[in-house]
Amino acid sequence: MSDLSNKLMRTLERCSQIFRGGKSSGSAKKKDKEEGASSAKSKVHSVPRVCTLDGFAEELEQKGGMDPTQLEPLTEIAVKTEDTLFAVTVLNPSESQILIQGGKLFSQPFKGKLCGASFGGSFLKMRWIGIGMRMEIRCDDCTVLTPPVRSIEVKDEPAILGPF
């Protein structure tokens, strides 16, 4: 096996460790060198299940979530992540327009578009808020990813009341 192939295998292994939450260490590099090229051929590298279309669909089904576009305008949703409670008000469900407040980035109410939810990879469930997933919100010229959602609660009453 060529040096380039060995480097590629080590890089894939480190990326896989990082994705799973592990750390790449100097001892892993030393171990790679000791094992040599012959054992590198026998290693099997796989993509995490959630990074495949089937795995993504299974996770969506198991974890659950909601489609805010099915709610009435001005419905408020409380979305809790690990360390933040977001107040999300659905402004225009058909266009996924929301008003969001919470956390450091949204200390004041901010108008944006809920693009959907992802597990942090390239798959995005459009117009969705999912448990264990990150909300992807388009604000002006940037896209914000929240920490993974822990809970979702739809409030009973519209956020804004009164004659206009």
Image (cartoon, grey):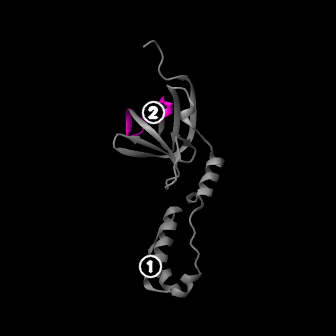
Q: Residue furthest front?
A: 94
Tell me if 139 is positioned left or right of 34 in this view: left
Residue 7 circle label: 1
Q: Is residue 114 above or below residue 155?
A: below
User: Residue flagged by tag 2: what amino acid is it?
Assistant: Ile
Secondary structure under badge 2?
Answer: strand
Residue 27 circle label: none
Q: Main secondary structure of the magenta part?
A: strand
Which residue appears at 58% of the width and 78% of the height?
43
Residues 83 and 151: in front is 151
Contact flag, marks 2 and 1 (Cβ < 8 Å): no
User: Residue flagged by tag 1: what amino acid is it?
Assistant: Lys
Tell me if 26 is positioned left or right of 56 in this view: left
Residue for badge 2: 98
Closer to the eye: label 2 or 1: 2
Residue 12: x percent and y percent? 49, 71
